[in-house]
Each structure stands twice: as C-alpha cells, then as structure tokens.
Amino acid sequence: MKNICDWNNCKDLGEYKAPKEKDNSKKFRMLCLKHIKEFNKNWNYFSGMSDSQVTDFLKSDMTWHKPTQSFSSSDNFFKVLWNNTFKFDHKDIKAFEILGLNVGMKWVEIQEKFKVLVKKFHPDMNLGNKKYEEKLKLITLAYTQLKNTYREKIDT
C-alpha cells in the first residue's frame, strides 16, 4: 500500500516521515519530497520554549537525556567497579595528585615522573630555595607511599 502525501491537497507519493509532535513519539506523517523539504526548512524543535528550557534541553542532551550520577555517588557503577578492582585508599589517591599523575598508571611511568620531579625541585637546581625543598619532601613522601602500597597491586 502506497501513502499519499499528507500535505494539503497534494496527490504525490508520501515517502518521507515527518514527526507530528516534538516528543520523539512514533507518530509521524508521510510527505512527498517537495513537502518534506518545506517541512524541514520550517521545522523548529525549540519553538515555544524559553531560553532556560532550551538550555536545560541542551545540557540534558549531552547525556542522551538519561539520568546521571556524580562519580562520588556511593552507588555509581564505575566507582564501585574501580574500588573493587584496586582498593585504593585516600593516601594513594593523594599521592597520585601530588605527583600530578592519573590513578592507575604503570609503575615505570610513576618512576619516570618521580625522576623528572626530583630534578626539577631539587635544592641544588633551585639555589637552596626552601619552597622547592618542601615541595621535594612532599613528592618523595608521595612516591614512597605508592612504592609501599600501589606497586604491589599493579606489578604482581
């Protein structure tokens, strides 16, 4: 069965779907090529919406209009998976932050970053500046923390 164009008094073959409503329902009408072009040219999904409604729609569109949870949410799937995989404690995570590394890096990469930071913040390289000396102490403590806990978890 062939569809006739659902445009006023048009007798051409309706081969193209055009939505009847904005709600993405399965309700549509069939239009011919000439009238689907006219329909598309004039279609404005956001007509009748306020600026804040358009903004809310666009923000929601970034997550495909699905509800989301923050990563810190206790039942977030990825957080549960991550915590059950490595069991990092807050000291490990803080150590990664101090070293400027992403959690989960290979031990070799951590060692390389540590060497770069030691050279950068060593007092001999900074004319004995106490600020750099304190930063180097933090870096060394962070590296020691990861060496004592994290290395065993990833390199076994």
Image: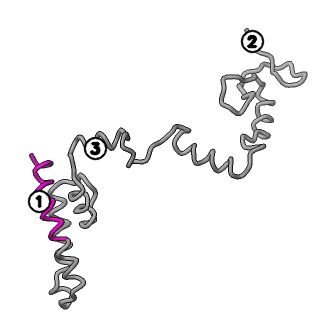
Q: Is residue 73 left or right of residue 60?
A: left
Q: CA distance from mark 1 to mark 2?
A: 72 Å
Which stretch appears magenta? 139-156
Disc 2 secondary structure class: loop
- In which quadrant of the rendered image does the C terminus lie? top left
Please rate how many residues cluster around mark 3, counting C-alpha atoms within 10 Å: few if below 14, some from 14 to 19, many from 20: few
Please name the predominant secondary structure of the magenta segment in the image. helix
Say whether residue 76 is magenta: no
Type of amino acid at the residue the image marks with label 3: Trp
For label 1, the residue is 147
Q: Residue furthest bottom?
A: 127
For label 3, the residue is 82
Rendered view: 94 above or below 25: below
- In which quadrant of the rendered image does the N terminus lie? top right
Dot 1 and dot 3 residues touching (CB under 8 Å): no
| Number of disc labels | 3
Q: Give residue 25's mark.
A: none
**Residue at 75%, 41% in the rendered image:** 44
Rendered view: 48 above or below 149: above
Disc 1 secondary structure class: helix
Q: CA distance from mark 2 to mark 3?
A: 55 Å
Please rate how many residues cluster around mark 1, counting C-alpha atoms within 10 Å: few if below 14, some from 14 to 19, many from 20: some
